[in-house]
Image: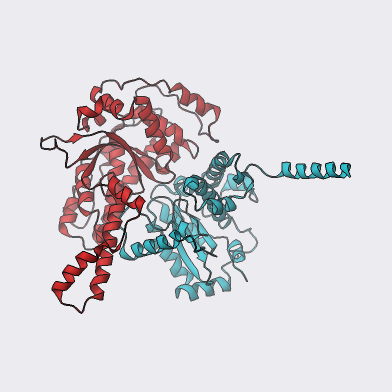
């Protein structure tokens, strides 16, 4: 069940997904995919197949189908010619608000999230006690003993000074961060990802320097095909709503001449008023704030159902924690302002 | 007099004590054979166990944990769902109760028919489909597979409901939404760009919910329920087998259950 043979090597390289399309544009495919050789201590072979290989294949196939079915502008198609993380990120940022590319953005986001969450995992280094059978109830004795045997957490994460410093500065301690991170993932009932992100304000006074400066780390949940980038769904709703009310005003005043119309529509665009929570949300999704993802945990049943069963999500998350490659996470960490680390 | 009073108290106490205080797994007919052999044309035995035994037991155990010691303890999941639907602080209870109910509806309408005679869709059902959609049932099945199921990116359910105008309607429900109360249908995934009509619907809905004087009445009744949660297809059909699974379910529905859900 648990892939005891450690011969599961180069699975990803052998997979080497390609976009097979009628257009030669997409031949690059998923060539630059993250190189996971095996994930012992987290997934069995079948589990890894479901959590990664079959899933990414499915998303790529669906992307191909969409690109072939409908007329996609060549610039958008170009961007998807190689499906690595940075390409997908720029595609999502560019087209996230375009309503005729919704399907493509959804698939790109799903693929991005999946790649990102797996890119920071490695086979577990500590010997993890694994259950022989999937748990059949919530919190049975075996589960509790596994969880408690892993509960002695170090106060720092070895080998990653900068990251542990930033985590302690932002959350208080590694323990607090772990609790926050794992429980956020546990609370997602459907599909979703839990992210560790660094916040970066564009209008920051120190942003003149070439490197990105962040003012702290945060834990964020996204659901279904949501991404941690500042797409602020509430902001988006408000934008479209004000656009809609503009259009309606335009229709009403279609008799008047063009110049009048322009002036009127700008002044009457306030006709939609935000509620208090919406305004608060709008602030939270401030357009000058940008989130830089550092870590992600996949909460979809597709990831844990095969190996851990319906009751095993908490075990899966516990194993994920032991499999995080902190060096990868640290390499993504922007410079943190010292004032926030005191 | 006094004796009689005590006697009455005693009876009341025993009645109170016999009230159900935890939720239990519903027992299906032939549960043992279903676990051993699965549902023909839909599930293997193991697939059935994941989709029903594990999933339902998980939901019920969680529901017991969150309702323990509250007034919800003695209610049916259906009533818990209706009570919790408007309370933001009870969203987790709503989710569990609604999913417990939906998953039960789902397994009921795919249980094997009983070997003797294969029952098909009743004339009433087919007529209603024609009247409501101007399409045949076969066409509607295709529409479910090719249009409605694709609106559910993550987890969810697909419902065919009969609304208060006695017309059929297709509902795609994200995660743990309910077909009984339209503000909690959860048909729209707010994680990506919404189309213009969806936004208009969203604002309409918000206006209705905001007004405390308007009592929302929704008399929808679910006729067919299909689960699109990973638990219901991952084991037998694999990650990319959702459409095949959906086809198999739609072609092997238990029509004696579905026909009886329609009022004659």
Q: Is residue A281 left or right of residue A317?
A: left
Residue B68 falls in which quadrant of the image?
A: top right
What is the display colour for chain B?
A: cyan
Total labels: the figure holds: 0
**Residue at horizontal 51 percent and vertical 63 percent from the top:** B216
Q: How is the image coloured?
A: by chain
Q: Is residue A55 visible?
A: yes
Q: Against A85, is A74 above or below?
A: below
Q: Against A228, is B101 above or below?
A: below
Of residues A307 and A339, the one nearer the viewer is A339
Give residue B264's position: percent from left, percent from top.
63, 71
Q: Is residue B176 left or right of residue A106?
A: right
> Which quadrant would the C terminus of chain A be assigned to in this image?
top left
Q: Is residue B215 left or right of residue A175?
A: right
**Residue at horizontal 39 percent and vertical 64 percent from the top:** B204
Q: Residue furthest bottom?
A: A255
Give residue A228's position: percent from left, percent from top.
28, 44
Q: Is residue A66 left or right of residue B35?
A: left
Of residues B177 and B73, the one nearer the viewer is B73
Q: Against A56, is A138 above or below?
A: above
> Which quadrant would the N terminus of chain A be assigned to in this image?
top left
Q: Against A19, is B138 above or below?
A: below
Give residue A270's position: percent from left, percent from top.
26, 62
**Residue at horizontal 60 percent and vertical 48 percent from the top:** B34
Residue B195 falls in which quadrant of the image?
A: bottom left
Q: Is residue A43 visible?
A: no
Of residues A133 and B71, the one nearer the viewer is B71
Give residue B142's position: percent from left, percent from top.
42, 65
Chain identifier for the red-coloured part of the image: A
């Amino acid at each position: 069940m648990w892939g005891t043979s450690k011969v599961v090597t180069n699975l990803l390289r052998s997979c080497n997904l390609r976009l097979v399309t009628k257009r030669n544009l997409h031949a690059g495919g998923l060539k630059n995919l993250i190189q996971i050789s095996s994930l012992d201590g987290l997934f069995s072979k079948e589990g890894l197949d479901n959590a990664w290989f079959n899933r990414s294949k499915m998303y790529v196939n669906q992307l191909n189908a969409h690109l072939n079915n409908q007329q996609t502008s060549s610039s958008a198609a170009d961007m998807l010619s190689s499906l690595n993380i940075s390409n997908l990120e720029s595609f999502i940022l560019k087209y996230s608000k375009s309503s005729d590319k919704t399907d493509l953005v959804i698939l790109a986001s799903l693929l991005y999230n999946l790649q990102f969450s797996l890119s920071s995992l490695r086979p577990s280094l500590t010997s993890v006690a694994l259950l022989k059978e999937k748990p059949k109830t919530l919190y049975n004795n075996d589960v509790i003993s596994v969880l408690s045997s892993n509960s002695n957490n170090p106060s720092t994460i070895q080998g990653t000074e900068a990251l542990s410093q930033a985590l302690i500065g932002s959350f208080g301690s590694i323990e607090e961060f772990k609790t926050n991170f794992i429980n956020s993932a546990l609370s997602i009932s459907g599909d979703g990802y839990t992210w560790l992100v660094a916040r970066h304000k564009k209008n920051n006074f120190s942003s003149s320097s070439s490197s990105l400066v962040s003012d702290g780390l945060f834990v964020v949940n996204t659901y279904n095909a949501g991404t941690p980038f500042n797409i602020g769904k509430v902001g988006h709703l408000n934008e479209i709503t004000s656009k809609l009310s503009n259009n309606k005003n335009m229709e009403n005043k279609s008799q008047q001449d063009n110049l009048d119309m322009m002036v009127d529509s700008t002044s009457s665009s306030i006709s939609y008023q935000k509620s208090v929570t919406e305004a608060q949300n709008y602030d939270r999704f401030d357009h000058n704030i940008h989130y830089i993802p550092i870590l992600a945990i996949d909460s979809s049943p597709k990831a844990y159902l095969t190996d851990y069963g319906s009751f095993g999500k908490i075990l899966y998350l516990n194993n994920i924690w032991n499999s995080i490659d902190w060096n990868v996470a640290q390499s993504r960490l922007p410079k943190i302002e010292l004032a926030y680390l005191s | 007099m006094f004796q009689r009073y005590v006697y009455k108290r005693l009876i009341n106490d025993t009645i109170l004590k016999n009230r159900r205080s935890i939720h239990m797994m519903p027992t299906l007919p032939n549960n043992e054979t279903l676990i051993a052999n699965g549902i023909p044309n839909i599930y293997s035995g193991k697939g059935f166990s994941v989709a029903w035994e594990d999933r339902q037991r998980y939901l019920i155990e969680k529901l017991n944990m969150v309702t323990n010691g509250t007034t919800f303890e003695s209610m049916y999941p259906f009533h818990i769902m209706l009570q919790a639907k408007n309370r933001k602080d009870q969203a987790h209870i709503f989710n569990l109760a609604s999913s417990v109910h939906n998953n039960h509806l789902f397994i009921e309408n795919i249980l094997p028919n009983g070997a003797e005679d294969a029952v098909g869709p009743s004339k009433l059902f087919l007529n209603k489909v024609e009247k409501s959609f101007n399409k045949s049932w076969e066409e509607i099945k295709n529409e479910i597979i090719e249009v409605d199921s694709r609106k559910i990116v993550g987890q969810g359910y697909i419902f065919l409901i009969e609304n208060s105008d006695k017309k059929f309607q297709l509902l795609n429900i994200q995660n743990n939404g309910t077909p009984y109360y339209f503000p909690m249908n959860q048909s729209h995934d707010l994680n990506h760009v919404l189309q213009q009509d969806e936004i208009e619907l969203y604002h309409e809905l918000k206006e209705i919910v905001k007004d405390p004087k308007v009592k929302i009445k929704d008399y929808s009744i679910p006729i067919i329920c299909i689960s699109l949660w990973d638990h219901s297809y991952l084991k037998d059909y694999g990650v990319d087998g959702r459409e095949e699974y959906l086809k198999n379910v739609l072609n092997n529905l238990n029509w004696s259950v579905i026909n009886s859900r329609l009022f004659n």
